[in-house]
Image (spheres, rainbow, N blue to C red):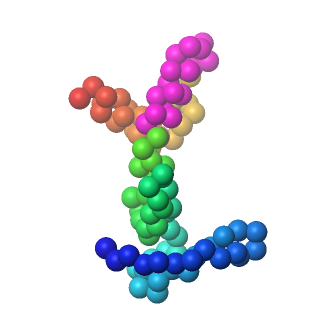
Amino acid sequence: MNTVVRKLFKHGHSHAITLPREFVATIKNREVILRYSREGVLISPKSRLDTLESDPLFVTFVRALGADAMKHPEKLHDPADAWSPEVVKLFSEMADDDEA
């Protein structure tokens, strides 16, 4: 992994940096993912695998929704009535993962 030093500069009401040409050449769809923490910022090309489900907090979010739903079971409906078959399949696979 190459390390490059860049300076922040003002761009309108925001701050920006220039990216090395070699990095920009690797970005196919012109979108990047910014991951930041106390340690720093990681900029990487967005791929097909970067989806909502790949976010580490997605499972936590879905579990919180489930816990809230269990507090009010009278509001629950058959998922097939409200969601597409793909969403129903996603939730059923998540339940299978928890049992393993």
Q: Is residue 73 magenta?
A: yes
Q: Residue furthest right?
A: 13
Taking the image as shown, residue 1 lies to the left or right of residue 61, namely left
Residue 23: where, in percent of width, then height?
A: 43, 80
Residue under the point 70% across and 68% down: 14
Pick the front one: 99 or 75:
99
> Looking at the rendering, in which quadrant would you find the N terminus?
bottom left
Q: Is residue 3 above or below residue 66?
A: below
Residue 49 in view, yes or no? yes
Is residue 77 shown above or below 89?
above
Question: Residue 93 in the image: x percent, y percent?
Answer: 34, 36
Q: Nearer the viewer, residue 94 or 7?
A: 7
- For the point 47% across and 78% down, the residue is 5
Predominant SS along the magenta part: helix
The magenta-colored residue range is 58-76
Is 91 a magenta residue?
no
Q: Residue at x 44, y 69 (%)?
A: 45
Residue 25 seen in the current view? no
Image quadrant holding the C terminus, namely top left
The percent position of residue 18, horizontal first and vertical second, equals 56, 80
**In the image, is residue 77 above or below residue 4?**
above
Residue drawn at x 46%, y 28% as measured from the top left: 63
Q: Picture quarter containing residue 44?
A: bottom left
Q: Position of residue 24 (x, y in %)?
A: 47, 81
User: Which image quadrant is residue 75 in?
Assistant: top right
